[in-house]
Every structure is written in C-alpha cells, then in structure tokens.
Image (cartoon, rainbow, N blue to C red):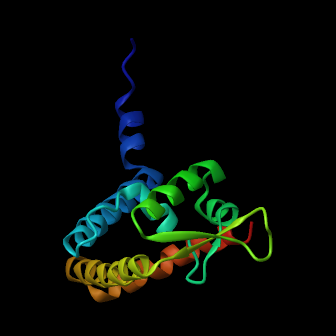
C-alpha cells in the first residue's frame, strides 16, 4: 500500500471544508452536552437534524427532510423516535390528508427553549475565546458564504 505524500495529508487535514466540519461537530457536541445538563439527556446528536429544521408552527416530514438534506424515510424514523420520547407529535395534515403535520409538544418546546439558552452560552464562550469583534466578523463571513447557497 502506497503512502500519501505529506502535502496531500496536510491539505486533507487543514482544508477549509474539514475545518468547517470539525467546528460544526465541536459546536454540536458542546450544545448537546449542555442540553443534557439542562435535563434533556435523551436527545441524541442525530435528533438535532429534526429539531433544527422543524418550524415552530409545525411542518410535514417531506419539507423537514428537504431542509435537513436527508431522505423522508430517515426523517420519518427520527420523527417516530422523538414522538416516542414526547418531543413531537404527528397529526393528519388538514391540507393533505396523505401527510402528517409534525409539531413540537410542550416538552419539545421546553427543549427548544433550553436549546436557545445553550446557544447563548456557547456564543458567550466563543466571545471569551475569540473576542466579541471576531465573533461578529465570523458571523458576517459565514453569512456571506451561506448566502450564495440559498440562491441555488
């Protein structure tokens, strides 16, 4: 088996895509740990794909899956799991009798409120680490990078 050249290994480890992935994973793991500390220890990292993409007024599985970038079957499994845990509920859609409307339960709304508190904590931690101006600049840069993707 041939060894990869050092420059390729370095590029693989330090490319911006991998750094984004690592930063995202670090953020998610920290947020999950804080959410667990707030009493929501039955939420797993994979559940956050639903929690982050479910509109406050509810939505259909197909729409949530599209926003999350996963299949509706995978989203359906996450919905079923979080429904069993009491975070969301499924009701027949009034607009489309073949579809279900997914909504947060009161317990789910409590978790959502806790998640927003967690986001504030992490942002303060980032400000302490990077400085307020750098965090503001980072946010602006990320928004600039995301904007072209939203136009596609």
Task: Write down the quadrant of residue 16 in the picture.
Answer: bottom left
Pick whichever, 76 or 140, lies toward us: 76
Pick whichever, 65 or 20, lies toward us: 65
x, y percent for residue 95: 80, 76
Height in image: 36 above or below 117?
Answer: above
Task: Write down the quadrant of residue 62 in the picture.
Answer: bottom right
Height in image: 64 above or below 143?
Answer: above
x, y percent for residue 57: 60, 83
Height in image: 91 above or below 18?
Answer: below
* Residue 96 seen from this side: yes
Residue at the image point whose x is 61% and y is 77% from the top: 58
Residue at the image point whose x is 51% and y is 64% from the top: 50
* Residue 52 seen from this side: no
x, y percent for residue 25: 36, 57
Pick whichever, 72 or 147, lies toward us: 72
Question: In the rendered image, which quarter contains the N terminus?
Answer: top left
Query: In this image, 23 relative to 71: left or right?
Result: left
Residue at the image point whose x is 51% and y is 57% from the top: 80
Residue furthest toward the top?
1
Task: Write down the quadrant of residue 111 in the picture.
Answer: bottom left
Question: In the rendered image, which quarter contains the C terminus?
Answer: bottom right
x, y percent for residue 31: 30, 69
Question: So how many labels did they put on this image?
Answer: 0
Residue at the image point whose x is 36% and y is 55% from the top: 22
Pick whichever, 90 or 12, lies toward us: 90
């Amino acid at each position: 088996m041939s060894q990869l050249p050092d420059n390729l290994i370095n590029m693989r480890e330090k490319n911006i895509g991998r750094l984004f992935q690592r930063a995202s994973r670090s953020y998610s793991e920290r947020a999950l740990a804080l959410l667990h500390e707030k009493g929501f220890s039955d939420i797993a990292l994979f559940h956050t794909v639903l929690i982050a993409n479910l509109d406050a007024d509810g939505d259909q599985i197909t729409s949530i899956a599209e926003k999350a970038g996963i299949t509706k079957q995978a989203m359906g499994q996450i919905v079923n799991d979080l429904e069993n845990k009491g975070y969301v509920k499924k009701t027949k859609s009034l607009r489309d009798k073949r579809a279900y409307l997914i909504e947060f339960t009161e317990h789910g709304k409590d978790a959502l409120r806790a998640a927003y508190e967690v986001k504030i904590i992490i942002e303060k931690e980032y400000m302490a680490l990077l400085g307020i101006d750098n965090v503001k600049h980072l946010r602006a840069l990320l928004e600039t990078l995301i904007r072209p993707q939203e136009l596609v």
